Each structure stands twice: as C-alpha cells, then as structure tokens.
C-alpha cells in the first residue's frame, strides 16, 4: 500500500469515528461556524466538530504543525478533502483568517505575529474582517485615504472603511492604511492589524437588497495600533495587499461550490418543471442546465490543474483573477437556472406557500449579484487577465 493510500485509510477511519452524525447533513447559512470570541453554536456538535478538527490540525491541513496546522502535503490535503466530501461533512470552520490573512502572515509576518495569530485562527478562537475598500477607493483601492501616523511605539489611525464583511462580529481587522501621503499612491501604503475592541473602532451594518447585512462601514477614530502590528515593511503594504487579493479572489471563485445544495440543477428542474422520459421536460431549460454542467466541469478541471501546478508551494498568481471572474459568473448563472427551474416558487420573500429552502434561494440569488463586484470587479479582473495573464499591451 502506498503512503497516500495509507493516509486515506487513516483519514477515513478517523473521520468515521470523529465526525458527528449531525455534521454530515446539509448546512444552512445560520449553521456556518465562523469562530471568534463571540461565536454562537446553533448545534453543540458544531463546536465538538471544530474542536476535534482543530486538535488534529485539519481546519488548516497544509499549514505548518508548529502553528496549529496539519502539516499535510498538497496530495494528502486533496485526499482529506475527498474523504470529507465522501461522508458529506460540513466545514468545521470558515474564516477570512484561513482564506486570506493566514497565508500572507505565513509569508510576510514576523515570528511573533505568527505565534500570536495563526494558532488562534486554526482553532477558531479569533474572527477577522478585511479593511480595504473606502467610500472613495473601491476599484481604485490604491486611492485609499485612511491615515496611520507613526507616534513613538504606535500608529495613530483615522479613516473610514466600507464593505467590511462581518466587521460587527469580528475580533480583529487586517487593514490597509496610508503611512506616507507624499509617496506615489501605491508606495505609501502599509498593512497593519487592528484589535476591534479598541474604543476608537466603530461599525455600522449595511443592509442589502437580500435583506441581510453582512457588510459594514467601519470608522477608525484615533485608534492606537502598536508598531508590532505592522506586517511586512513600512510603506510596502501594496505588495501584501496584492497577494492577499489573490487569495481572496480564489476564495470568492469557490462561492458556488460552498453554497451548492444536495439537489442538482437537473433534479430541481425535474421536481419543479416536470420530466419527460426521465429528462427535464423543457428542452431549452434542459440545454441551459447541460451547458452549465459542462462549464462547471471544465472550470473544476482547470482549477484542479492549477492546484497541481501549485504543488511546488507556489502561491496563487494572476490566474486567480481568471478563477474569480469565471467562478462568480458560474455562480450567478447557477442561481439564475435555479430560479428558472423553480419558477414563482423561487420568488418568495416571506409568508405561507414557500418552503425554507425556496426562501433561501431568493436571497442567495440577490446576494450573488455582488459576486462580480466584491474582491475586485469583473472589469478589474478582465484587465488583470489581459495584462498579466495574456500579456496584452496597455
């Protein structure tokens, strides 16, 4: 038996013994475990599952063991992912710390920063949010104006961030700030970590058309940030910002996969729109579903190829813009097809006559419209692809 097969057998046995039955069922949005100091667990088994996975290091399977990770190779991590999917296991932990901050801390952070933050991310003890966009610096992120002025052993930070997802529930925020207003706009930016418990930090949720308020405005007023919370070099934050955006875009590209229900589009269409000879009755809808399935399969194979190419340890590159662009378009198309399949049952907002999953679809459809804006608009991604992937002239 090869080492990889031995690992698969070991992982399978451990998962069967340690994943609670309740964590092998479809996950609603309010079941998601984000962790943090104020975490509330709807199901006690969710906390048990998190603790067991964290103790094993499998919330972050490829991170180094010395920081609470699993120390797995990319091949082993893929096997673990397959085994988790085989039993229908819910993610033990979802976290901006895992998807975005952790990878850049591992690359750019000091040893003290790694020891302080990364194990807590892996255990789900700290919840992070992102402080990038500003009211006048959205797609032109480098135009940000939030200032961090060095004052002895700390920075004094003042500014206004917007679209800071879940800032009202976060413990810390990783933030881009301007530390040299006289430098070129890409060269006077630094990357710092801010404790949300500072009395100068204030958040205000932004209500979306979906009825939810995952985004916030964040106000920073005379916030004192220790110099030790600077990640990387002073005024070199743009380098880190770009690397983190690559991780963020990779995460957003997988949104559809994380939200996918147990029923396929084909099954939904047969249930709602009817079937003829075992096939979706409407030929136009059937063709659209088949094309989406082909595109999704091609996208999955492309991302798998990129994963294989990254096995050498390389971080996501400009191609993440391609994944983000196409992944979000696929997710939007998927939800449009769900609406087409379910008809008026997918247009309910509240009241009798609608099942809970139908009301969830309505909100997911509305929420998906932001996929092509967050993490850099689709137009920005197309520019990145043109310049840095295809090498086209300006």
Image (cartoon, rainbow, N blue to C red):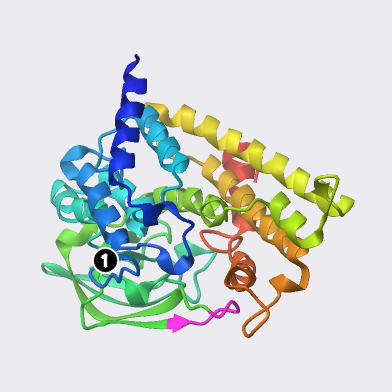
The residue labelled by disc 1 is 36
Can you give x and y, in whole percent of width and height, for residue 85 in the image? Answer: 46, 42
Q: Residue at x 25, y 68 (%)?
A: 194
Q: Is residue 181 left or right of residue 153?
A: right
Our reading of the magenta stretch's main secondary structure is loop
Graded by Cα atoms within 10 Å as few (under 14), some (14 to 19) or many (20 or more), the crowding at tag 1 reads: many
Which of these two is toward me, 221 or 251? 251
Q: Kindly tell me whether residue 175 is visible in this rendering.
A: no
Q: Residue at x 41, y 65 (%)?
A: 31
Quadrant housing residue 389: top right
Quadrant housing residue 126: bottom left
Can you give x and y, in whole percent of width and height, for residue 17 in the image? Answer: 28, 42
Which of these two is toward me, 9 or 59? 9
Residue range highlighted in magenta: 205-211
Can you give x and y, in whole percent of width and height, for residue 195 in the image? Answer: 22, 70
Can you give x and y, in whole percent of width and height, for residue 68 in the image? Answer: 20, 45
Q: Is residue 280 left or right of residue 247?
A: right
Quadrant housing residue 241: bottom left
- Up/down of 129 relative to 162, above or below: above
Can residue 206 be found in the magenta stretch? yes
Q: Residue at x 23, y 42 (%)?
A: 56
Q: Kindly tell me whether residue 87 is visible in this rendering.
A: yes
Can residue 93 be found in the magenta stretch? no
- Name the quadrant of the N terminus: top left
- Up/down of 218 relative to 315, above or below: below
- Up/down of 265 relative to 35, above or below: above
């Amino acid at each position: 038996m090869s080492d990889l097969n031995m690992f698969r057998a070991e992982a399978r046995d451990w998962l069967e013994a340690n994943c609670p039955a309740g964590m092998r069922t479809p996950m609603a949005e309010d079941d998601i475990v984000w962790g943090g100091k104020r975490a509330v667990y709807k199901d006690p088994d969710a906390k048990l599952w998190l603790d067991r996975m964290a103790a094993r290091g499998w919330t972050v399977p490829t991170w180094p063991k010395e920081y609470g990770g699993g120390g797995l190779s990319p091949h082993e991590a893929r096997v673990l992912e397959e085994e988790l999917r085989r039993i229908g296991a819910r993610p033990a932990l979802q976290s901006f710390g895992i998807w975005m901050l952790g990878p850049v801390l591992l690359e750019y952070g000091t040893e003290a920063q790694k020891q302080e933050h990364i194990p807590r991310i892996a255990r789900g003890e700290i919840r992070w949010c992102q402080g990038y966009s500003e009211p006048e610096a959205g797609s032109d992120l480098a135009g940000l104006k939030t200032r961090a002025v060095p004052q002895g052993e700390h920075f004094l930070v003042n500014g206004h961030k917007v679209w800071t997802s879940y800032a009202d529930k976060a413990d810390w925020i990783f933030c881009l700030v301007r530390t040299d207003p006289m430098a070129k706009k890409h060269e006077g930016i630094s990357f710092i970590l801010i404790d949300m418990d500072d009395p100068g930090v204030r958040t205000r949720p932004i209500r979306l058309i979906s009825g939810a308020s995952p985004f916030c405005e964040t106000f920073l007023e005379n916030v004192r940030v220790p110099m030790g919370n600077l990640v990387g070099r002073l005024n070199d934050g743009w380098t880190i910002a770009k690397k983190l955006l690559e991780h963020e875009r990779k995460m957003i590209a997988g949104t559809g996969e994380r939200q996918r229900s147990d029923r396929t589009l084909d099954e939904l269409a047969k249930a709602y729109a009817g079937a003829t000879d075992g096939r979706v009755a409407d030929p136009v809808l059937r063709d659209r579903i088949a094309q989406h399935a082909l595109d999704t399969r091609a996208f999955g194979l492309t991302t798998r190829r990129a994963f294989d190419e990254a096995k050498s340890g390389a971080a996501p590159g400009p191609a993440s813009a391609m994944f983000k662009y196409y992944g979000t378009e696929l997710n939007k198309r998927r939800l449009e097809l769900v609406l087409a399949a379910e008809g008026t049952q997918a247009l309910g907002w509240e009241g009798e006559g609608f099942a809970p999953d139908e009301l969830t679809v309505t909100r997911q459809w509305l929420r998906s419209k932001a996929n092509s804006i967050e993490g850099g608009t689709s137009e920005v991604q197309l520019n990145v692809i043109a310049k840095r992937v295809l090498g086209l002239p300006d």
